[in-house]
Amino acid sequence: MTAQSFVDAIARAEAHAPFLRLALEQQPDLAAQLAQGVVPDPAPFDPDLPVSVALRRARRREALIVAIADLAGALDLVGVTRRLTDFADRALDLAIRTAIRERAPDADASGFAGIALGKQGSHELNYSSDIDPILLFDPTTLPHRAREEPVEAAVRIARRVVELLQARDGEGYVLRVDLRLRPSPEVTPIALPVDAAISYYESQALPWERAAFIRARACAGDMALGQRFLDAIRPFVWRRAVDFGAVGEIREITRRIRDHHAQGQAFGPGFDLKRGRGGIREVEFFTQIHQLIHGGRDPSLRAPATMDALDRLCAGGRITSEEARALKSAYVALRTIEHRLQMVDDRQTHALPRAGEALEGVSRLAGFEDSAGLIAMLRPHVERVGQIYDSLDARDEAALASDADSLSAQLGAMGFGDGASAVQMIERWRGGSYPALRSPAARQALEAVLPGLMSALGQAPDPRAALVQLDTMLSRLPSAINFFRLIEARPQLGQLMATILSHAPPLAGALSRRPALLDGLIDATALEPVGDVTALAEEMRSGEAGDDYEAALQRVRLVVGEKRFALGAQLVAGTSDPMEVAHGYALVAEAAIEVLGAATVAEFARAHGHVPDSELLTLALGRLGGGALTHASDLDLIYLFTGDFSAESDGPKPLGAVHYYNRLAQRLSAALSVPTAAGALYEIDTRLRPSGAQGPLVVSLAGFAKYQQEDAWTWEHMALTRARAVFGSQRARRDVAAVIDAVLKAPRDTAKLITDAVEMRAEMARHKPPQGSLDAKLLPGGLVDLEFAVHVAQLSHPGVPIDPDLDPAIDMLAREGIVPASLGEDYRFLTRMLVLLRLVAPDNEPPSSPTRELILRSLGADSWEALVARFSATRQEVARVWQSVSGEKNGGT
């Protein structure tokens, strides 16, 4: 900025802002500095003056500096609000310390803290704003006089703080202080005991109070006390299960504000920049609503400042880039003009003047030639903010009729062919026959969502089946209020839920047991790829600091349940290819093993220490080893340990290495499989370990290598082609990979290999027959035959690289001419069928016509007959490959 821009700013201030004109006259030295383009840094409070005087003179100095720098363009909105907030923090801190020392001269500020809320909490204070702190004290550490109760001392200190900041005298005032954001301000003291405040927010607080604490921070006094309070109530603010009642209440607050301040108010002179439709508060509330919805699951969204939060919401895919850009631009424009209004007379005003002369003065102070230019600049911002905020409202639906005949007609028009049975269910719900629907609030929430919900269910391929599933779910819910509010706030979820209830019994069952799973689908990111193992593991670890072992396990179970449910939803919604979903299931399982493995090792070491120069190593085989699971897959694991088997652990309760690792592996298997309130994770199958079910659960890496080289059966080497380490250090993973590579590349008797494989396949067929006419795994020519053919080909040609993932493994064999190139597409088709049918037709029999349509869309088939024909032809091709590899004859049909 040039000095001229400061001269121009001072001229506008003198001409149009009486408060600034007086401040310039009272501080000529400071005015001279500003006229030269110098923006002085904040100065310390003058210790030689009485505190009340020092505070007021410092405020007058900061007000002039910030105003002229703002008008000159030397500070942007963030710089202005940050500097104003920093001054407020320093002033509140000095007032607290002064009030305490006046009563206890040798005391510091321990035991008394200021929590900044609102714009102070987010470093966004207005030019002439009040502050809205909550004042807390700790009765055990607060300095107080003899024979004085701590609560009495705290109230007296708080009153003195307010007096030091707010009282007007010949020097003016410092800050207006509003303490009404504390709990129950009409009955509670102005300073609250910290434990009572924590108890209130944990058990009694109103929904809107959650939004207030999005921007809360410790800002003055005993900062450790303030942070302790905020840490304690964090779960109250940021909930993983979205409380759409809180969201609805915030929106209702905005509606009331609109009615009170903007009813019949056209944009123009007199418009309230803060409370009017399309104003500042709607930008803030739009941002906070999205933070409340998503911030419990995504800590990156917990930014207190509005523009920072908009950036993060956009980066996280929660709002569009256009919405973020429009809201940020509007926020800057509206807040900037708001500051110009407040500079005129140092009044906390937010409304444009109605009188022509006053409006012209504000416009010229802001750098416009006249008020028409100011109004023209603001209008598009206000209109766009109003449009964006209005998009939060769910569409209004006509209420469903209360009499049976009219209701039946409505439901028939929605798509329910059998309107009578649907009427019976709705009447049962309205009658409160289920525990979740017995309260008036629950039935009110039901009526609000019924029109949209029934419309969505009516569009399902099988509306009655979907309705029956919903009825079952409601019968099991302990409470239905938040479930209905979620559907009301996100109407598009109604259609997706209808599809899930109609087509996917495993997902419908999971939803009936844990309705909060639906929360995970509230935005489009749930229908995108799950991310890599590192990102998934980080999400599974991101619990509250200090979580114990059981809390860590519960966190993993919750995240795994949500991810598996979302992947299943991707299948039935048709947003992802079944192959991608299969890989997603495997990534989730691998991340769970990594996180639970580390947590279990750490917990076990508390009692038993570590075995020196040794570690647990986990191998995945089968579908997990190949990186492609189904919704119902179990996990084939082998546990190994490195180092000396005769060593002993170094903990308080030492164990020999073999005993140590067998007990540790049992703990890890339990962590992965034992059911809890959040559900079980996986079935664990360790029968592929050396010596099978008769052998020890864990063996040393050296013992594993010896067994595989000398004693393993052919089928164990076949299984080893899909083995890969999923838990252990990089060094240990390299060591076991070298062992596996040496075993698989060793010379072998091809004739014996084939004979053993054929016998093993026949044995499997006797004990595990196909489960239905669509069993893509066990039918002749299905995936098992394909896998046998591939593994025999791999072991027969040790010069061809082996990849645990069958897709590239088949491609490498095809390039060498060992298997036909078409086998890769056969594998992908059968895998897609397996993954999809495990979810929508778990009995492997042809489903109803509506579900067939879903399968056809997902697999890209034109008709059911064409799909069945392709299934048959694919199995015949696989059977021919298996026959060419093994020499065995089978029909493949």
Image (spheres, rainbow, N blue to C red):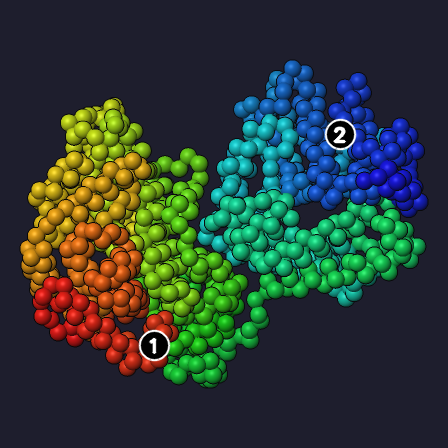
Give the quadrant of residue 704: top left
Q: Decide which of 207, 598 is in the foreground and name it.
A: 598
* Residue type for callout 2: Pro
Residue 278 appears at what percent x and percent y? Answer: 71, 59
Q: Which mark is residue 42?
A: 2
Within 10 Å of the Cα at label 2, are there few (<14), some (14-19), or many (20+) other Cα atoms?
few
Residue 725 appears at what percent x and percent y? Answer: 27, 44
Q: Residue at x 34, y 52 (%)?
A: 587
Q: Decide which of 853, 162 is in the foreground and name it.
A: 853
**Label 2: which secondary element:** loop
Circle 1 residue: 861
- Can residue 93 be seen? yes
Q: Is residue 523 above or below residue 609?
A: below
Q: Which mark is residue 799?
A: none
Residue 550 appears at what percent x and percent y? Answer: 33, 40
What's the distance in space between the residues labelled 2 and 1, CA to CA? Answer: 71 Å
Q: Quadrant of the N terminus?
A: top right
